[in-house]
Image (spheres, helix red, strand yellow):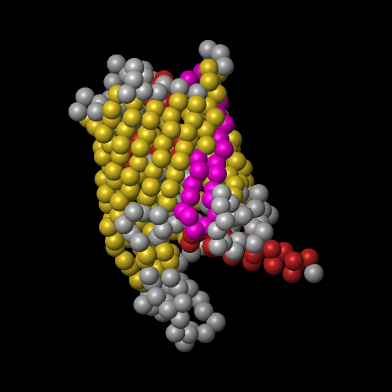
Amino acid sequence: MIKIKKSAILCLALLASTFYAVAQQDAQYSQYMFNSLVINPAYAGYKSTLNLSALHRSQWVGVDGAPQTQSLVLDGSFASDKVGLALSIVNDKIGLQRQSNAYLNYAYKLKVSETGTLAFGLGLGMGQFVLDNGDAHFDDPSDGNFAGGKLSFIVPDARVGIHYSTQKFYAGFSATNLLTGAVNYSTAAKNLVIKQGQHFFLTAGYLVDVNDFLKFKPSFLLKEDTKGPSNLDINNFFLLGEKVWLGVSYRTSLNLWKKNVAQGNVKAGDAIVGMAEIYAGKSLRIGYAYDYSVSGLRGFDNGSHEISIGYTFGQRKEYSILSPRYF
């Protein structure tokens, strides 16, 4: 009886996770606050240096078909620090579905006060959506609802954003998947339609000087796609001696307004995240995050692991190392 109960809970959790993955098509990140370009094109050139960052995320380790995400971002500042340019590449795989996106991002920065900068961003690129049934096993191979082989679609895409920052505060809003519309695999699987809906991100954070050695940075990120449950990240970080970030985040699903969402009692997005970022010198950054599920998947997966690395080329002497690293 206990085994049957656990199996039922696991099935319910996976169903909720599948809904979450379809409704929330954008890749999940935990370390976005250290490189907001993955969610906002207006962040391009924010650090006023040439930066390269890479990330790998293994979500819900131990669950077959769980998401695997990789990202690569190169960005810099040009035209006397008035323009930011960036190339961002993301690959995300869940189950039989794989999504790859590449964007060229442009940000124009306006100095609106002595310490405040307002940036407007635009990202243009392409998205490839792949459905690979080659490794799938069906009870009835003759079922016409599913066809073997691989289907691939390439579509144009755009995203926009706005980002405001000072040395102690930042806020941003962005919208993604503006052109992709619906990617429909129904030509080969008439009961399967996967849509790439628009996503909206609202974020803000503040820096508090506790003392000369310790700084505190609370922040939040609200993620919305208007069809699935809203998602909220609440983050609290401490900076130790300008070298090490240590923090914890709580990620939860919530209903900001009434939606036609049948998610039952399982909230696949709920997790507690522990993170650390270490600066090995002035140019190299290494980060790690561990997500512990507090949803219906708890007890069936081994958490989520996320590793990131960043490198700054030729840091300008006129820019303090402190300000760019706060946000």
Q: Quadrant of the N terminus?
A: bottom right
Residue at image point 55% right, 58% down: 259
User: Residue 49: where, in percent of width, then height?
Assistant: 30, 28
Residue at image point 69% right, 63% down: 9
User: Residue 42: where, in percent of width, then height?
Assistant: 33, 37
User: Residue 290: where, in percent of width, then height?
Assistant: 57, 42
Examine the image and state in which quarter residue 129 appears.
Answer: bottom left
State the residue lying farthest toward the right: 1
Q: In which quarter of the image is the C terminus?
A: top left
Q: Nearer the viewer, residue 125 or 283?
A: 125
Q: Can residue 77 be seen in this view?
A: no
| The residue stretch that appears in magenta | 221-242
Locate residue 25 relative to residue 118 in the image: left or right: right
Locate residue 96 relative to residue 275 in the image: left or right: left
Examine the image and state in which quarter residue 162 appears.
Answer: top left
Is most of the magenta stretch helix, strand or loop? strand
User: Residue 134: where, in percent of width, then height?
Assistant: 42, 73
Residue at image point 60% right, 61% down: 263
Q: Is residue 5 above or below residue 102?
A: below
Residue at image point 55% right, 35% down: 235
